Image (cartoon, rainbow, N blue to C red):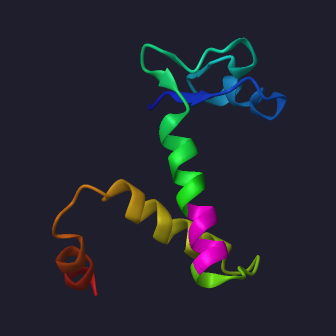
């Protein structure tokens, strides 16, 4: 099971019961401790927000899971030089 790394926002408190979970304390200037950081998540949300605001302009609640899946795929394959070929092969 993967580690869930977050900041100390109270909304993540219930994760500790279900998943391996560690936090960094941004309020105290802590942004990374070993492999515990929120850098990848921050990058993902930044790309998603730019895509929604700049490209799609509006996202309905009904289609939000599809947008999240698309941006998740893009983020997870951001270093893949053949991403276009791989996507076409899946069609």
Residue occupying image coordinates x 55% and y 32%: 38
Rendered location of residue 48, percent (x, y): 58, 63
Quadrant into which the N terminus falls: top left
Please provide the residue range marked out in magenta: 48-54
Rendered location of residue 90, percent (x, y): 26, 80
Q: Is residue 77 above or below residue 63?
A: above
- Is 17 included in the stretch rendered in magenta? no
Comparing 27 with 80, the one in front is: 27
- Is 49 included in the stretch rendered in magenta? yes
For residue 79, side relative to residue 6 (left or right): left
Residue occupying image coordinates x 17% and y 64%: 81
Rendered location of residue 58, percent (x, y): 72, 82
The number of numbered badges drawn on the structure is 0
Comparing 41 with 2, the one in front is: 41
Instruction: Name which quarter of the figure residue 91 lies in.
Output: bottom left
For residue 65, side relative to residue 74 (left or right): right
Residue occupying image coordinates x 53% and y 60%: 47
Q: Is residue 6 above or below residue 73?
A: above
What is the magenta segment's predominant secondary structure? Answer: helix
Instruction: Name which quarter of the figure residue 64 lies in.
Output: bottom right
Rendered location of residue 51, percent (x, y): 56, 71
Residue occupying image coordinates x 58% and y 55%: 46
């Amino acid at each position: 099971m993967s580690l869930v790394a977050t900041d100390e926002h109270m909304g993540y408190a219930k994760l500790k019961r279900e998943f391996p979970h560690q936090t960094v304390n941004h309020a105290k200037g802590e942004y990374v401790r070993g492999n515990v950081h929120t850098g990848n998540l921050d990058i993902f949300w930044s790309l998603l927000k730019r895509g929604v605001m700049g490209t799609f302009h509006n996202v309905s609640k009904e289609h939000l899971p599809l947008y999240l899946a698309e941006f998740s795929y893009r983020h997870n394959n951001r270093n893949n030089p053949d991403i276009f070929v791989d996507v076409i092969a899946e069609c």
